[in-house]
Image (cartoon, coloured by chain):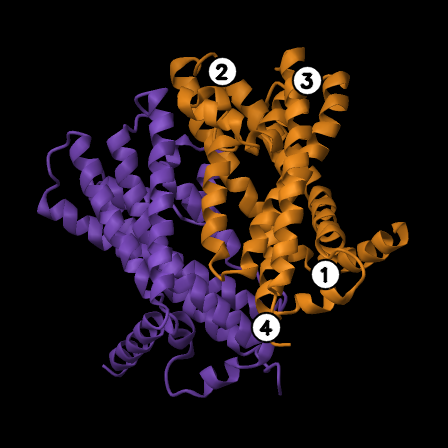
Amino acid sequence: MLNIYKRFWQVNWAEQWQYRANLMMYLAYGLVSPITYLAVWSAIADAQGNVNGLTSANFAAYYLTLLPVDILTTCITIYYLAYKIQDGTLSNELLQPVHPILTNTLVNNLAFKILQTMIFVPIWIALVLLFRPTFTYTWQSLLLSAPAIGMGFFIRFLLESTLTLIAFWTTRVWAIYHFDTAVSMLLNGAFVPLVLLPAWAQTMAHLLPYQLTLSFPILLLLNQLPLEQILLNYGLQVFWLIVLYGLFNFVWRQAIKQFSAVGA
Amino acid sequence: MHIIRVLVALFKINIQQELAYRVDTVVNILTSIMWLAWELLGLGIIFSNTNNIAGWRLGDVLALLGVFKIVNAYMQAIAWPNTETFNQGIHEGTLDYTFLLPVSSQFMVSFSRIVIWNVWNILLGIVLIVIGLFSAGNAPPSWINTFTFLVLIVSGALVIYSLWIVLITLTFWFTKFDNNVTLLQALMDTGRYPSVVYPVWLRVIVTFVIPIAVATTVPLQALRGELTWWQIALAILVSIVAVFLSARFWKAGIKRYSGASA
């Protein structure tokens, strides 16, 4: 099995490496909204001293931690897989004796992620020098956040893969994806630290898995969570991983049953 | 007049294409309503914590979002779909046919695809501007300010268009430059908020290097009567120079084209 993953890695790494110029564009695009929100909240915090106790240095630390965590936990599954399902090229992969999503698609995501991280590091250093945040990282918080980021990525991966499987039934999977993105951007902490959301939205955020993929690892890194919160969120991550894995498997079995391989 | 007849024909073709996928049009409009709700909710959250962003009140920011939606409608309706056709043309050599036509190649590359339903986003933009201006408690803008606003929207759109031409022309040199327009869209997206909120280095980029602010913040300032005549003249001058230079650049670029299939 390890050999299979190794081979998939070689193929996908070579493929992503070819598209490195495009990757830089994606990266530039991904920087814009966090920097915009950072600018807006900093302007407000500077004008009135703080927003709910958060100063502009706090906002800078939050959004500059968000950028790497976001790169590590997001997913490109729908871009990679939806077209393959729609134009029927997935047929080839279905003939192989391994699960196409849990091998090829997963490894493709990882290759994309690692290449993106390599390009991102110098950009991040430049942004830190420009915005001068006060980071509150400690060795413990860095160590604790590693499993949280890993599980956060798998939660996002299973969620988005399940969503992409809808492409087996309808070509309008992109509209559903837009809706998912909108809800997730509001409730995972990408728009604003969750404490600034109205009470009803905070409740919703904690009932849904989205905050586990971004807000939780960020706050963990910044050392802002008490021990019981850390344990609770770890527990929630494990819980959602099990639920989403079950859901993903169920939808996958239904999906391949009615796959008719367009173009084959 | 020749070019107008071509444009009318292109409109007809694109409307026919869209009518073939009516349900998609409905889904697209619903998606755009959902994003509007998202943006309004976002502004609601921001303004529940403050009553202004760098001196801009809720109504002002709403009006700015309206201007942004109008300019962005150009990106969604014309720039993106034509980029797709253009990139495909470069890779597969179908761009040959464009050069064979007895019409300006820059014109055909820029306007052959038009996604009509985006007219909806222009309407939304106008509604947001009207609501924003009235809720800010300003007196209704004078005729002369409204006229200047319209002129500056057009000149702003021309600047964006020129930047687009430059970006796609670069593809003649770097064939693999598929994501050429993503960068433009990324900087465009900063136009949702007044340029004064950004740190100086970013403000310099969006005002002078890639002048997005010329297309969003500046027209709105004209509508509110905050611009002096020389600022208006400068904005118009910038757009004329941009159109001229980008057309020259396009001409230089097409000399590099050799045809992928030939």
Q: Color of chain A here?
A: orange
Circles 4, 3 touching at the beta carbon (< 8 Å): no
Pointer 1 with pointer 2, Cβ within 8 A = no
Say which of marks 2 and 3 sits in front: 3
Assign the C terminus of chain A to one quadrant of the image.
Answer: bottom right
Closer to viewer: mark 1 or mark 3: 3
Q: How many marks?
A: 4
Q: Which residue is mark 1?
A: A18
Q: Do the dots labelled 2 and 3 sit on one chain?
A: yes
Q: Amino acid under label 4?
A: Val
Circle nearer the viewer, 4 or 2: 4
Q: Residue A54's mark?
A: 2
Q: Which of disc 3 and disc 2 is earlier in sequence? A: 2
Q: Residues within 10 Å of mark 4 (few under 14, many from 20)?
A: few
- Amino acid beneath label 3: Leu
In whole angstroms, how far apart are the C-alphas of marks 4 and 3? 47 Å
Q: Which residue is mark 4?
A: A262
Relative height, residue B85 to residue A26 (above, below):
below
> Considering only order in the chain, which callout, 2 or 1, is on the residue closer to the N terminus?
1
Rendered image quadrant of residue A60: top right
Label 3 CA crowd tier, 10 Å (few <14, some 14–19, many 20+): few
Q: Amino acid at mark 2?
A: Leu
- Residue under mark 3: which chain is it in? A
Disc sitting over residue B54 in the figure: none
Chain letter for the residue marked with disc 1 in the picture = A
In the rendered picture, chain B carries what hue? purple
Direction from residue A7 to residue B132 in the image, left or right: left
**What residue is shown with label 3?**
A231
Q: Marks 1 and 2: same chain?
A: yes
Q: For mark 3, give the secondary structure.
A: helix
Q: Nearer the viewer, residue B138 or A211?
A: A211
Rounded to the nearest angstrom, the CA distance separating label 1 from label 4 is 28 Å
